[in-house]
Amino acid sequence: MASNLSQATTDVNRLSELVDFFNKICLGGASEDATLDNQTRPVLAKLAASFLLGMDTYATVAEGLAGAGEGGFFQVVSDVDEEYTILYQNVNGVAIEKKRYPSWQMVALIFQARDRAEAAATAAEQDANQAEASASQAATDAADARAASEASGNILFYDTKADADAATLTEDQIVHVFADETREGRQSRYRVESGALVFKTHPNEYGRMSSPISWHSQTIDKDFTIPTGMNGWSFGPEITIADGVTVTVSEGSTWTIANGEVQ
């Protein structure tokens, strides 16, 4: 049993050596050799390079045919910028084309085309992402516009959401709440749908929260109450409370008027 195991190990090691040798022969570079059993052999790429470098190069096909014997190979310098040489074989006195080898200009063009393709793919991906973001923003704007439209018409006004909930309302009635305790004391619009108040929008808030500029009226022309435990704010420096109008700051609440630099 030990002898069989030893032989199997030897066979596996030998197979590994052969695989490594043939891989080197097939895949090695143009300056490399492969060694097996202390014998060194040039790899295929090295043989091909030696073959091409040792081959005579001629200015014309006629000169190549004259210089190469029957069955021999020769190169002719190509007159095309993208090519370096053309490989021919002399077959019964006729030059048979075998291969065309690219010039460094052609290789440079290939890499440039690859770089342009990659850049174009990246730009296309960025454009697609931007289009998706724009579509999403458009859908949001459309939803806001639809909500504002739904929240227009004959309107009943209530100081708080609780007052509106306690009222007897008809289907599709629009309700405006001055200080909505369920929405941080903001003004809110609802519509009665299936007997329930369904929120639609916050009116009179023309600047979007994501916008760099927001605004509101400089005059408070309706009574307003800041609910308990809330921080109210307004933009100054010009804020006027109309005659007969009262702003009530509930216990535990504050009202701040921001007086920023006037532009």
Image: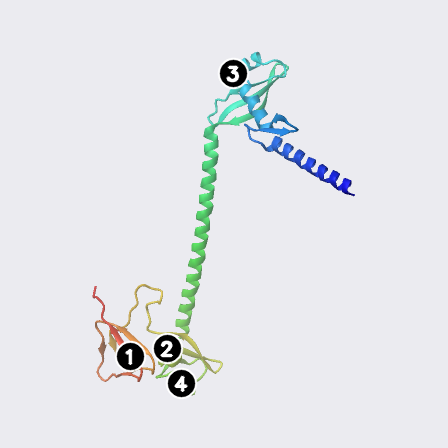
Of the numbered discs 2 and 3, the one sitting upstream in the chain is 3
**Residue 162: percent from left, percent from top:** 40, 85
Of the numbered discs 4 and 2, the one sitting upstream in the chain is 4
The amino acid type found where label 3 is placed reads Thr
Task: Measure how far apart labels 1 and 4 are at the Cα level.
Answer: 22 Å
Q: Is label 2 in a helix, a strand or a loop?
A: loop
The amino acid type found where label 4 is placed reads Ala
Task: Measure how far apart labels 3 and 4 are at the Cα level.
Answer: 100 Å
Q: Nearer the viewer, residue 123 or 3?
A: 3
Task: Measure how far apart labels 4 and 2 are at the Cα level.
Answer: 14 Å
Q: Residue at x 55, y 19 (%)?
A: 54
What is the number of the mark on residue 60?
3
Query: Residue beneath label 4, please?
Result: 162
Query: Residue beneath label 2, please?
Result: 184
**1 or 4: mark nearer the eye:** 1
Query: Residue beneath label 1, please?
Result: 254
